[in-house]
Image (tube, grey):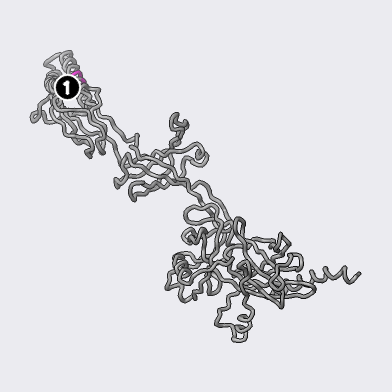
Amino acid sequence: MNKARWMPILIVIAIGIVAGGLILTLDKPSTVPADAVNANTNEKLAENQPGIGPRGGKLFTDSDFSVELTIFEKGVPPQFRIYLYEKGKLLPPTVANLAITLSRLGAPAQLFKFAPEADYLLGDQVVEEPHSFDIAIATERNGKVMRWSYSQIEGRVEIPDEMLKSMGVALLTAGPATIKPKLKLPGEVTFNEHTIVRVVPRVAGMVTSVQGHHGQHVKKGDVLAVLESPMLADLRSQYYVAKKRLGLTRATYEREKQLWEEKISAKQDFLLAQELWNEAEIALELAATKLIALGVQPESNHSKITISRYEIRSPISGIIIAKAIALGEAVKEDREIYTVADVSTVWTAITVYPKDLNVVKEGQKVAVKATAYDVESEGTITYISTLIGGQTRTATARVELDNQAGKWRPGMFVNAELVAEEIQVPVAVSVAAIQTLRDWSVVFGRYDRFFEVRPLELGRNDGEMVEVLKGLTSGEQYAGGNSFAIKAELGKAGASHDH
């Protein structure tokens, strides 16, 4: 009775010892090339190669007892399912105890334990992709322990170090990184409202010449239009009369001063002449001020021009963006006839959605890229509207851009990119290293002379680095630049996927 009671416990202990031994022997990745195995080992492996079982799995046999290993993944994550046979007849899954040790390149060995499920034994873990590994099976039935081993290769290619340089493949190491996700927002280039000037005549008159036209680049002081102005003619006449009078009163003052000093005339006559001279000076200064206020130089050579001619000049260098004047029409002094904009700097009006308002801040650096062609610049957010638009339900952020080269044109549509946040992640890889294989996002891990597919579960990225949630550990090497060359080599070598 005691012997019968302790037998199952002893059997479980025996399987544990066997499985532990297999872990120790298979813990190292199987990276030994086939040509390094001696002839005797090759013969033994050939003898122990598994057959194909009734369910398409690997069939391992010892005398009349057989174990069929399958990987089932229809509608569920990949899982080991094991069927037991005796002389080809399916046995209940409870007649034997079984454990599998699975060893991969660059990873510690995994121990799979099994429990009965329907008519098979079900593994207690997911069989992760790729299905490229060495396995050792330990089975106990009726006190007898049986062992088998098997290697399966998938998504692996051998490339010696000396070939990597010629292929242009760079090796990188997965590890901690700072991910800086970028927020992309639409926008439009507009004029800098601080550099827009509206031109008015300042005097009424008849248009006799129009020289500035819409879209024309002008320099400060360039003549935009010419008016014939009776008001200007009157002001110029007043100035010339005041100038003549000043000359006469000055001469009278100098004469009366001399006569008074020679005691020929009375002092009263001298003081009167001085007063008249002072009044003439004031009148000339007032007449000159009126002309200067209109942008007219009082001492211009009036003998060569008509005194009623009034030239409207550009107050700044820039581009004419609006024109409301025509030859022959009468214009009033307060009418806007031109709008000139200095486009050496421009604004970008960026659309900010309510959900992004907590990310966009004044003083933030922004990369602005044109949507139509390759133009890019960097600016700083100088203003964010405090109100949300009634119809658009968005706010507006303003970025000022240098435009000395003239590459930005108002009306252009742009995309603005800014760093939303900085996130520290424990494992990240280069975005350029990511390749697509089947429906996986993968990198190619480097293990001695081999590259092997590593399907990844990816997290946040900033266009340069991407967070790895699962599939690669910190410190593992992988193919970085030119990783598509590894994919091409893998395609030449062919790939298998056993179930």
Residue at 39% across, 46% down: 368
Q: Nearer the viewer, residue 293 or 97?
A: 97
- Residue lying at the far right of the rendered structure: 1
The quarter of the displayed image where residue 334 is located:
top left
Report the side of 208 relative to 45 (left or right): left
Q: Nearer the viewer, residue 467 or 196?
A: 467
* Residue closer to the observer: 64 or 359: 64
**Label 1 sits on residue:** 330
**Magenta stretch?**
277-282
Residue at left 51%, top 38%?
355
Q: Is residue 100 visible?
A: yes
Quadrant for residue 47, please give it. bottom right
Q: Report whether residue 254 is seen.
A: no
Which residue lies most toward the bottom here? 39
Position above or below: 125 against 390 = below
Q: Name the secondary structure under disc 1.
A: strand
Q: Position of residue 443 (x, y in %)?
A: 51, 63
Question: Of helix, strand and loop, which mostly describes the magenta segment?
Answer: helix
Percent of width and height locating residue 48: 64, 79
Residue 124 in magenta stretch: no
87 up-or-down from 443: above or below: below
* Relative to 199, residue 125 above or below: below
At label 1, counting other C-alpha atoms closer than 10 Å, the crowd grade (few under 14, some 14-19, many 20 or more) is some
- Residue at 26%, 35% in the rendered image: 321
Residue placed at 36% from the left, 49% from the top?
376
The number of numbered badges drawn on the structure is 1
Q: Is residue 353 left or right of residue 115?
A: left
Q: Position of residue 469 (x, y in %)?
A: 58, 56
Q: Is residue 213 left or right of residue 445?
A: left
Quarter the N terminus occupies = bottom right
Residue 117 x/y as whole percent: 71, 60
Q: Mark 1 is on which residue type?
A: Ala
